[in-house]
Image (cartoon, rainbow, N blue to C red):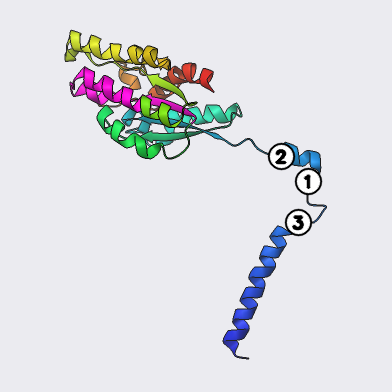
């Protein structure tokens, strides 16, 4: 027998032995019937955070310090069976989100947190288009996962965009929440917007401390949906 054949036989024998060992647990190693039932973990459900740079954690040293990641810490500390998925994309508009959502809905979603619109407002895009895009996203989620719970985060624009525009823009979110019977975070950046020490140099994106307050704003509403 050649050395190559001997080597092949030895290799296959080793693999078979390893597999056999892992699949044949001794009786002493097997959990008792009661232990087996207790050891079964509840499958985790998915909370999808769908938004722009505020969700993505733009400018932070670690994106995990954005509010979706901080909410994951809270969820874990309470032993709640949820996995937080951060689907934030910097620069995203409601139109871009409406195009992107279909791909993300290929994976199960149990709770959907929608944070979009800020970039529409900063660019002065038509408020009615923002409303239509957000409604389309909500409709797609409801159609794909009828039992999915949805949380919409409200947004406002700076007063320099004009009083009428700012008022019309802010009204989009409570209108959508009422028409779709979904939960609403009145203003995502409550107690953060305009506070210099809680925002990065651009005055728009929260620092890590600012993200902690954003997390509290979202959690106050989200916790009742879990």
Give the quarter of the figure containing the C terminus: top right
Q: With 41 as the anchor, is 115 left or right in this view?
A: left
Label 1–label 2 contact, CB within 8 A:
yes
**Image height check: is 61 above or below 208?**
below
Image quadrant assignment for residue 115: top left
**Image height check: is 109 above or below 125?**
below
State which region is magenta.
110-138
The mark tally for this picture is 3
The location of residue 177, given as percent across then percent down, is: 38, 15
Image quadrant assignment for residue 154: top left
What is the CA distance from the residue labelled 2 to the residue labelled 3?
A: 16 Å
Q: Residue at x 61, y 29 (%)?
A: 79
Mark closer to the chain start, 2 or 3: 3
Image quadrant assignment for residue 93: top left
The location of residue 211, given as percent across then percent down, is: 40, 25
Give the quarter of the figure containing the N terminus: bottom right
Q: Which residue is mark 1?
A: 31
Quick one: SS at disc 3? loop
Quick one: SS at disc 1? loop
Residue farthest to the bottom, as pictured: 1
Q: Which residue is mark 3?
A: 25
- Numbered circle sitting on residue 39: 2
What is the CA distance from the residue labelled 1 to the residue labelled 3?
A: 10 Å
Residue 136 on the magenta segment:
yes
């Amino acid at each position: 027998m050649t050395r190559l054949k001997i080597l092949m036989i030895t290799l296959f024998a080793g693999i078979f032995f390893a597999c056999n060992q892992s699949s044949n647990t001794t009786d002493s190693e097997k959990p008792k019937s009661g232990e087996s039932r207790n050891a079964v973990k509840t499958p985790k459900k998915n909370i999808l955070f769908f938004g722009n740079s505020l969700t993505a954690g733009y400018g932070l040293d670690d994106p995990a310090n954005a509010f979706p990641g901080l909410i994951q810490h809270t969820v874990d500390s309470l032993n709640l069976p949820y996995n937080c998925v951060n689907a934030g994309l910097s620069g995203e508009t409601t139109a871009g989100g409406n195009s992107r959502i279909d791909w993300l809905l290929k994976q199960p979603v149990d709770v959907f947190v929608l944070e979009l619109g800020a970039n529409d407002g900063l660019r002065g895009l038509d408020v009615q288009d923002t409303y239509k895009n957000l409604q389309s996203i909500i409709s797609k989620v409801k159609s794909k996962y009828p039992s999915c719970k949805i949380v919409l985060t409200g947004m406002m624009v700076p007063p320099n965009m004009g009083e009428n525009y700012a008022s019309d823009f802010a009204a989009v979110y409570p209108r959508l929440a009422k028409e779709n019977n979904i939960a609403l975070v009145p203003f995502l950046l409550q107690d953060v917007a305009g506070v210099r020490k809680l925002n990065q140099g651009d005055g728009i994106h929260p620092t890590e401390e600012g993200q902690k307050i954003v997390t509290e704003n979202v959690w106050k509403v989200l916790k009742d949906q879990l």
